Image: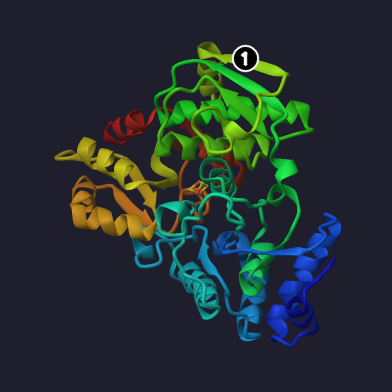
Amino acid sequence: MDLTLTERQMLKGEYGPSTRKAMEILVALGTIYQAEKMIPVSSVQVSGVSYDNLGEAGLEFLSEMASGGGKARVLTTLNPAGMDIENQASLGISQEFARQQQRVIDAFGRMGIVTTCTCTPYLTGNLPHFGEHIAWAESSAVCYANSVLGARTNREGGPSALAAALTGRTPAYGLHLSENRRPGLTVRVQAELGDTYQFGALGLLIGRQIEMRKLNRVVYIRGITQTSLENLKSFCASLATYGGAALFHMENITPEATLFEPPAEVVALGQADIEAASRSLNDDTAGEIDFVSLGCPHLSIHEIARVAELLHGKKVKKTFWITTARPTRQIADRMGYTAIIEEAGAVIAADTCCVVAPIQGRFHTLATDSAKACYYAYGKNKIRTRFMSFDEVIYEALK
Ligand code: F3S
């Protein structure tokens, strides 16, 4: 790779051992993907934050990087942790887990990383603009950043995102290069989609098409006439989970769609396909619902307002977690939504989610509007899932 003087100095250790380690990671990655050079990034989002996923080995790596003088050179935020950092007791998280999780957060903090833990950094101030090169790790956020914002990022792993934070660079390959952002398949949607769960089902369907074809994971979607930030974040989470996609173009909706002609190969998806996909996310072996959660990806303030509206003056009868970013929760506090939700007996939790929290063995069946949560709930926490609309999830909590 063609490295600049500063990059070579980083590699030699002249900026300290952590920066050297970070540059070694990036050079190894760039060599694998035949990158010719590094490019500067202006924003980073690091995954691998929950102690439940990291374990002792991951914590040790982070502690070493912090002790070795590593400092973030660009705005860097974190993916969700395994608990609400300011109130772990509200979610029934053990003190032992909380201690270890706090050590993880402290290590990131010592490296100058903003310890806002969210999979929707674009809602809380880590908001890149069109064409900006960034290094993000959370798959749903990567898909949102590339597609909806028109920023440029590969799907980083935890270590490579941290390395980008400590050096302010990433290897120039993959979706940083214009030629790799070209779509390979047109998907024509002939269905009325209005709710987050329907966009999640669409993500599942398109994801399956991508998996079947394998070659180009960028799709060009036609036929969607109306959407919202919330629908797009749900779609991104599902498309990334089921199709491994990090970029799509949506005609008249996403900024790069105008740059390309729709590819000749076309797949049509109709209302019946969406409904069948929704049904397929309902686990037939699921028992009675004992856990209800909204917030995968983390809820927007608009969604929290809807939860408060439907819970106002009522009492939930099941464990109900509403997960979001801390800055969004702070807005909810100020607007009085948190008080309404807590008065109803639900929990509004910041920094975490129903997938990355350590909840194995506590619940049997989850009600969710998230296609992504359906994918991970059983795989990670052995929890079966019922898939339904946003409002139906709230009604389920009240039953
Ligand atoms: Fe976010 Fe957790 Fe879902 S990290 S996308 S809420 S699995």
From the viewer's perspective, tell me whether residue 133 is left or right of residue 97. right
Q: Is residue 370 visible?
A: no
Tell me the quadrant of the picture where the C terminus can be found: top left
Q: What residue is drawn where x is 27% and y is 56%?
A: 331
Q: Find out if the beta carbon at label 1 lies less than 8 Å from the nearest ligand 1 atom.
A: no
Front one among 203 and 131: 131
Q: Is residue 222 visible?
A: yes
Counting from the top left corner in percent of width and height, residue 81 is at 49, 61
Counting from the top left corner in percent of width and height, residue 88 is at 38, 64
From the viewer's perspective, tell me whether residue 265 is left or right of residue 329. right
Tell me the quadrant of the picture where the N terminus can be found: bottom right
Q: Secondary structure at mark 1?
A: strand
From the viewer's perspective, tell me whether residue 227 is left or right of residue 320. right
Q: Dot 1 corresponds to which residue?
A: 268
**The image quarter in which residue 74 lies:** bottom right
Please rate how many residues cluster around mark 1, counting C-alpha atoms within 10 Å: few if below 14, some from 14 to 19, many from 20.
few
From the viewer's perspective, tell me whether residue 257 is left or right of residue 323. right
Q: By what rule are the colours in the image chosen? A: rainbow
198 over 355 or under it: above or below: above
87 over 343 or under it: above or below: below
**The image quarter in which residue 210 lies:** top right
Q: What residue is drawn where x is 47% and y is 36%?
A: 232
Q: What residue is drawn where x is 42% and y is 26%?
A: 226
253 over 28 or under it: above or below: above
Counting from the top left corner in percent of width and height, residue 260 is at 65, 31
Residue type at the position of mark 1: Ala
Q: What residue is drawn where x is 42% and y is 30%?
A: 227
